[in-house]
Image (spheres, grey):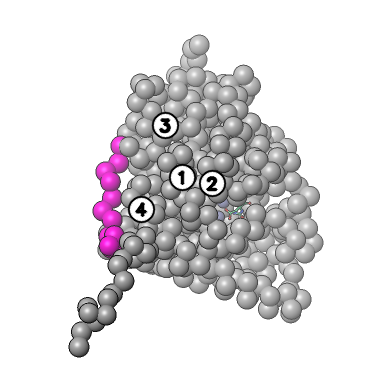
Amino acid sequence: ETVDVTGQFLLPGAIDVHVHFREPGYTHKEDWRTGSAAAAMGGTTTVFEMPNTNPPTRSVKELRQKQEAAAKAHVDYGIYGLLAEDNIDELQGLIDGGVNAFKCFMGNTFGNLPSPSTGAMLEGFEIIAPSGLRISLHAETASIMAWRQKRLMEAGRNDPLAHIAARPAIVAAEAVSRAAELAEWTGARIHILHISSAAELRPLAAAKARGVEITGETCPCYLLLDSRDYARLGSIIRVNPPVREASDSEAIWAALQSGVIDMIATDHAPHTVEEKTRDVIWQADCGFPGVETQMPLMLNEVSKGRMTLEHYVAISAENPAKSFGLWPHKGRIETGAHADIAVVDMNRTETIRAEALHSRGKITPFEGVSVTGVPIHTLVRGRFVQRDRKLVPETSGWGRQVTSIQAMPKPTIRNADQTLAASLQAPAITAEGAGP
Ligand code: NCD
Ligand code: ZN
Ligand code: ZN
């Protein structure tokens, strides 16, 4: 198979560490075939898929179910295990069973998984830290949001902007700083998902400065949309955490440029058109598809001169690979060289249309946006999964689970002698030892 790529750019395929493919459990929204087809069409060659499916990926049993569903993928993938209050005793099994990372929902979101107490989180961090696997945080503090939403609902607020009011940036900033404390204490590697506010950047930068193993991502919606878009988009824009003020997106752009934010991910969160378009904001599902539109939207920013192509490669492929243990060889030494490539045409202009998306979620806040810079071919381990803007349908099943971490040095475990597991084993203090 050959194609003429004269005048095109060959980029490493994007590695998107934050997608929801909904299978098992919510396949009317998406499944592994449609979600990974969207990835292939978007120039993304590896995705890390989230555990808020039904059942959630809470033990080895559900991990095996997910691996079965994922076998139809067009692109390579990592699988997240859940870190929650009720599966602490399953974490080691998930590590041994081959999860690529963990997600901890500090605040409620789609799937309504209860957020763990800080005590349960600490024990979870202690268990996961020695594995070196990264723990990704949905960093929003549940108790603040629940209180504010209750007060807003009592006051009869049900318009789209009430979603921001229920989740002011303190919600995220408080959670980031608490997660960073736990990571520093335990030596766990952590990652802050979907950074949406200027306020989160201070605890993130401070944690980095004192040597905490912490990385951060933002998503196109936080860079390209702001509160002025709520009137136009209504409930479509509803996402957790919310799209905020223009000053927040300015700060997020600056943090991406300076390296405080390490990478771009999509939080690809498909729902049906009906689930997204509701008159009462509290009834609209949160999130929207993104894995197919990320690369065109960001290449469009490259076209406009807002970032260099080299920087885009760093935040879309290099930094996620380093952070999630896929550097330098993606952990799959047995396959030899892996040509995961997006061929991009920086002169091609397209208009984003929800109905043309390969995701089952045919709705996007970027409807009608014209983008210059499009991935026209995608190769996963040397094989075309997208060719000339067309999916190669027979590559369903070509995707493989990646292996995280072997290439990364083991982290230093701090305070190992004070873990809950160590404390449970400590001998009782005897009467003689207690002094006079
Ligand atoms: C995500 C989803 O729908 O699964 N929704 C969202 O608004 N981001 C869940 C999440 O990542 O919070
Ligand atoms: Zn989340
Ligand atoms: Zn998400």
Residue underneath mark 3: 12
| Residue name at image x 48 percent, y 56 percent | 88
User: Few, some or many C-alpha atoms within 10 Å of disc 1 (few <14, some 14-19, many ≥20)?
Assistant: some
Cβ–Cβ under 8 Å for marks 1 and 4: no
Task: Find the distance from the CA under tag 2 to the CA under tag 1.
Answer: 7 Å
User: Few, some or many C-alpha atoms within 10 Å of disc 2 (few <14, some 14-19, many ≥20)?
Assistant: many
317 or 366, which is in the foreground?
317
The three-letter code of the residue at mark 2 reads: Ser
Q: Earlier in the sequence, mark 2 or mark 1?
A: 2
How many numbered badges does the structure rendering display?
4
Mark 3 residue element: strand
369 or 287, which is in the foreground?
287
Q: Earlier in the sequence, mark 2 or mark 4?
A: 2
Mark 4 residue element: helix
Residue underneath mark 4: 129
Where does residue 67 sit, x and y in percent of width and height? 56, 34
Q: Quadrant of residue 155?
A: bottom right
Where does residue 404 sit, x and y in percent of width and height? 39, 38
Residue underneath mark 1: 93
249 or 406, which is in the foreground?
406
The three-letter code of the residue at mark 4 reads: Ala
Mark 2 residue element: loop
Mark 1 residue element: helix
355, above or below 436, in the image? above
In front of the other: label 3 or label 1? 1
Mark 3 C-beta to ligand 3 under 8 Å:
no
Question: What range is drawn magenta here?
Answer: 407-419
